[in-house]
Image (cartoon, grey):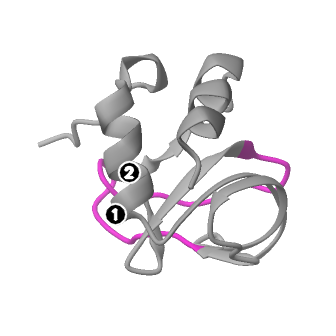
């Protein structure tokens, strides 16, 4: 069974508000280096909530687990200290703008 993730363009204002309220961190960042493929040192371009310097990937099966790659740039959403498959969104200008509008 594959994971069912909402695409970046599918995020409504209420989805964005829910993410910002429930997530530990939401950042637009780039992966600088890897301790392992599941732990990444990042540089944050913009924080919408929190300031993690290291991201940890949620483990799981091949469909729902995730890993990081050096140079990868995205919007990362952290829950319970980890980024899941659905917690990595492309850094699209419209989504970044909308996150800025809802930033707390």
49 is higher (above) or lower (below) than 2: below
Residue in front for this viewpoint, 17 or 66: 17
Residue 54 location (% of width, % of height): 71, 78
90 is higher (above) or lower (below) than 68: above
Image quadrant occupied by the N terminus: top left
Q: Which mark is residue 19?
A: 2
Residue at point 46%, 57% (across, down): 66
Residue at point 38%, 71% (across, down): 59
Q: Quadrant of residue 35?
A: bottom right
Label 2: how many residues lie within 10 Å, few (<14), some (14-19) or many (20+)?
many
Residue at point 33%, 54% (across, down): 62
Residue in front for this viewpoint, 62 or 73: 73
Residue 44 location (% of width, % of height): 82, 59
Label 1: how many residues lie within 10 Å, few (<14), some (14-19) or many (20+)?
few
Residue 56 location (% of width, % of height): 56, 76
Residue 62 magenta-highlighted: yes
Name the residue beneath numbered marker 1. 22
Q: Please give the range of residues in magenta.
A: 56-73
């Amino acid at each position: 069974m594959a994971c069912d993730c909402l695409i970046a363009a599918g995020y409504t204002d209420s989805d964005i508000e829910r993410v910002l309220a429930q997530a530990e961190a939401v950042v637009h960042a780039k992966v600088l280096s890897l301790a392992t493929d599941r732990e990444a040192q990042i540089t944050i371009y913009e924080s919408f909530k929190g300031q993690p310097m290291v991201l940890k990937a949620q483990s799981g099966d091949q469909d729902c687990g995730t890993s990081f790659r050096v140079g990868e740039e995205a919007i990362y959403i952290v829950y319970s200290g980890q980024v899941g498959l659905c917690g990595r969104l492309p850094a699209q200008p419209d989504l970044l703008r909308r996150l800025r509008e809802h930033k707390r």
